Image (cartoon, rainbow, N blue to C red):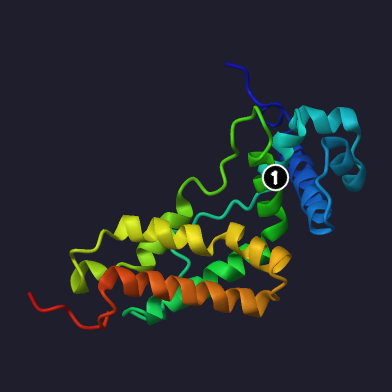
Amino acid sequence: MSMPYEATGRTNQKARTRQALIEAARRLLADGQTPQVEDAAEAAGISRTTAYRYFGNQRALLQAAHPDIAPATLLGPDAPGALPARLDAFVEAFCDYNFTWQHQLRAALRLALEPGTAPPTLRQGRAVAWVEDALRPLAQTHPQVDINELAVAIRSAIGIESLIWLTDIAGYDRTQATRTVHRTARALLAAATGGTDQGRKRSP
C-alpha cells in the first residue's frame, strides 16, 4: 500500500503546504468560487505540480476543505437540560455551524449532485448524533418516542439544504431562516410527543 505524498520525508513542511492549499481553497469558496486544484495552488503561491501531489483532483481538494469538526455535541456545558429549550439551543448552534461553513457545505452538495460519482461524505451521520444528543431527555420523559427516527426527521428539515433553500429561493435573511427552522424543529418535537410538556414525565 503506497503512502500519501505528505507522509514521507519533510513531513512538517509538507503538512504546512497541504494546509496552505486547503486554506486557499476555503478562501476561494468564501468568494463564491468552486476552485480547481490549480486555482488553490495559484492562490497559495504553490506550483501546480506540487499541488497535484497533495490533491489529485478537485474532489479531493474540496473534501479536504470541508470542515473537519467532530465534537460529540454542539451544546455547551450550560445548555438547558429540558426540552424544548434544549432543542432550541441546539438549533441555534447548528444554524451557526451551517452558516459559518456554508461555502464548504455548498461545495460538498454540488459534488453530491454530480452524475456518476460517489457522494462525498458530508458529516458521516454526525449531525444526526448531534440532534440525538439534544433530544436525550426524551429517553426519560417520553420513552415511547424513537429518538433516532425523530433526529433524522429534524436533521432533514433544519440542515444546510433547508437553509440554502430559505436564503436562496425564499429570499430570507439569516435571522429569518434560523427562526423558520426553529419552528420546524419545535413542530416535529411536538408531533412526536403529542404536544405534551417535554419537561414532565408522562404518566403511564
Quadrant of image for the C terminus: bottom left
Q: Residue furthest top?
A: 1
Q: Is residue 193 visible?
A: yes
Image coordinates of residue 50 in percent, x first then y, are 85, 30
- In the image shown, does 105 or 81 lie closer to the viewer? 105
- In the image shown, does 107 or 15 lie closer to the viewer? 107
Residue at horizontal 70%, vertical 76%? 173
Which quarter of the figure has residue 194?
Answer: bottom left
Quadrant of image for the N terminus: top right
Residue at horizontal 20%, vertical 74%? 141
Q: Which residue is mark 1?
A: 110
- In the image shown, does 177 or 127 lie closer to the viewer? 177
Q: Does residue 10 appear left or right of residue 197 in this picture?
A: right
Image coordinates of residue 164 in percent, x first then y, are 66, 61
**The disc labelled 1 sits on which kind of residue?**
Arg
Q: Does residue 193 appear left or right of residue 3 in this picture?
A: left
| Crowd around label 1: few <14 · some 14–19 · many ≥20 (10 Å) | few
Q: Secondary structure at mark 1?
A: helix
Image coordinates of residue 118 in percent, x first then y, are 59, 31
Which quarter of the figure has residue 192?
Answer: bottom left
Q: Is residue 137 visible?
A: no
Residue at horizontal 33%, vertical 55%? 149
116 shown above or below 98: above
Q: Residue furthest left?
A: 204
33 shown above or below 203: above
Q: Does residue 92 appear left or right of residue 80 in this picture?
A: right
Residue at horizontal 78%, vertical 27%? 53
| Label tally | 1
